[in-house]
Image: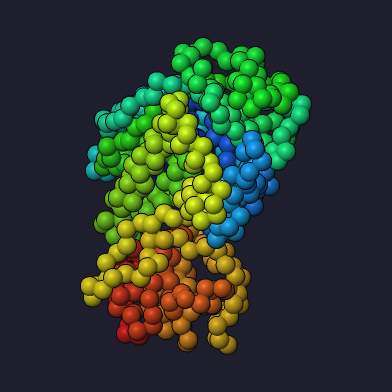
Amino acid sequence: MSSSPSVLVVGAGPTGLALAAELATAGIACRVLDKRPNASPHSRAFGLLPRTLELLALRGRADAFVAQGLPWAHAALGDGKRWLDYRGIDSAFPYMLVIPQSRTEEQLASWALESGARIERGTTVTGLRQDGHGVELEVVGPDGTRIESADYVVGCDGVHSTVRTLAGIPFQGSSYDSSLIVADVRLDSPPDPPVHARTGRRGMVVFFPFGDGTYRLIALDHERMGAPVDEPVTLEELRESCRAILGTDFGLHDPLWMSRFRSDQRLSDRYRLGRVLLAGDAAHTHIPSGGQGLQTGIQDAMNLGWKLAAQLSGWAPDHLLDSYQRERRPIARATLRRTDLVYKFEVSNSPGARVLRGLTTRLMGLPPLQNSVIEQLSGLTLRYPPLSRPEGSAPHKLVGRRLADAELRPRDAAAEAGGRLYEHFRQAGFVLLDQSHGGFCGQAALDGWARRVTVVRGAYEGRTELPEAVLLRPDGYVAWAGHAGETPSLRAALRHWCGAPSRVPSRV
């Protein structure tokens, strides 16, 4: 990998580190610049949801995260009823992984460094210039001011993004006027089960265990929400809120840190301006309801990484890099709408709102409704806009959706041995799952795109309704699905996603 970076990533939070790891995995020279002299020991986010874990599993990294966290499949409300039950979803990760953001960043940094990326801390960006050939950043580091050059720069530097500001990209939205409390504490008498939540007239309190004796506490106390955001949180304030809402404080003591915060709801006008791109909180920010912020940021990185790598490797079709904004910005806009509704639902203290919250809590006990909410919260229902087929027919229903991991079994004597589907995404390339007899579909991909597409011959266990061939993007979403007689359509999809063939394909 070249010592001169093709991409400068500004911000060493989860989004920036995930992007650096993706780029480096694809062989792209990448450097991460972060203004903090050291990684933060505090954790705003505290969990990884199923789809985020699936994306990490594509690169063989999920097990390392699971080993550092605490999987939990369901929580308990104050009355003992189950809440947020993940066990019915179609995923190899039917749970939320409770893991401090600090540990998530440690794992992402290890992945990035092992893959060849560089991380430079204590470096502040103070200027930005770009033209049709590249980007220059003026940075101030321990050795003074210097100029850094690269083909592209990606701002992953949070809500107050310097990259976004210097590029002149508007960040529109509004700020809430109510504050919540977040703290990491120890408990003398932990709840059982350990994930515990309760809502009442006074507000809501939720506990999440980190597995090391500490708990993440989130308190929404209607009597304290008007407190100035800069007013220090006290241990007695936490205890009083818990007793008023839960009837107990579980003997909370020895807080590692306590913070009062207010959220913004903002969305960047664009995710790309020339050779400057934005991802994560630099592009969108919202309240942390449902833990969507960190998930959306890592998913931004996994969407952008392979597209930027394709651009820098010289084979990307003209539209590919722009598809990052077309695909990801609507996701953020919809997330902002949902989280805004959830926030207003949670903070309203009117009699009608209290009745509605009680009714919703009871309805969430119904498995069909709870499963629907969990699948959306988990990121499993996301669908990117499908590519229209050249003959004008509708694309297969799988196109644009993710395909869950599964065992693969040999379909015939010529097929390779099985293994699992996600094992074939380790190098961040396209995968064609070919279930056709004789490998008819796979040959169409190999004849022109062999260096960009891995052809896997085998049958997807447990899904007999799948078509004969499924072309999957490096981020695990279906780019095309069809049958052996539709090779013109498959070739059109390969051109659209993988660029021009390396040679004129022979007829199959």
Question: Horizontally, is 137 left or right of 117 in the view?
Answer: left
| Residue 14 appears in the rendering | no
- Percent from the top left, x then y, of residue 252? 70, 23
| Residue 67 appears in the rendering | yes
Q: Which residue appears at 51% of the width and 46% of the height?
A: 363
Instruction: Identify which residue, 462 or 391, lies in the foreground.
Output: 462
- Residue positioned most to the right: 188
Instruction: Identify which residue, 497 or 389, lies in the foreground.
Output: 389
Residue 419 to residue 2: above or below = below
Residue 387 to residue 461: above or below = above
- Percent from the top left, x then y, of residue 459? 54, 77
Q: Which residue appears at 65% of the width and 38% of the height?
A: 79
Instruction: Identify which residue, 189 or 26, lies in the foreground.
Output: 189
Residue 81 to residue 232: above or below = below
Q: Which residue appears at 73% of the width and 23% of the height?
A: 251
- Percent from the top left, x then y, of residue 58? 53, 58
- Percent from the top left, x then y, of residue 50? 55, 51
- Number of numbered discs visible in the structure rendering: 0
Colouring chosen for the image of the structure: rainbow
Which image quadrant is residue 337 in? Answer: top left
Q: Which residue appears at 60% of the width and 70% of the height?
A: 407
Quadrant housing the C terminus? bottom left
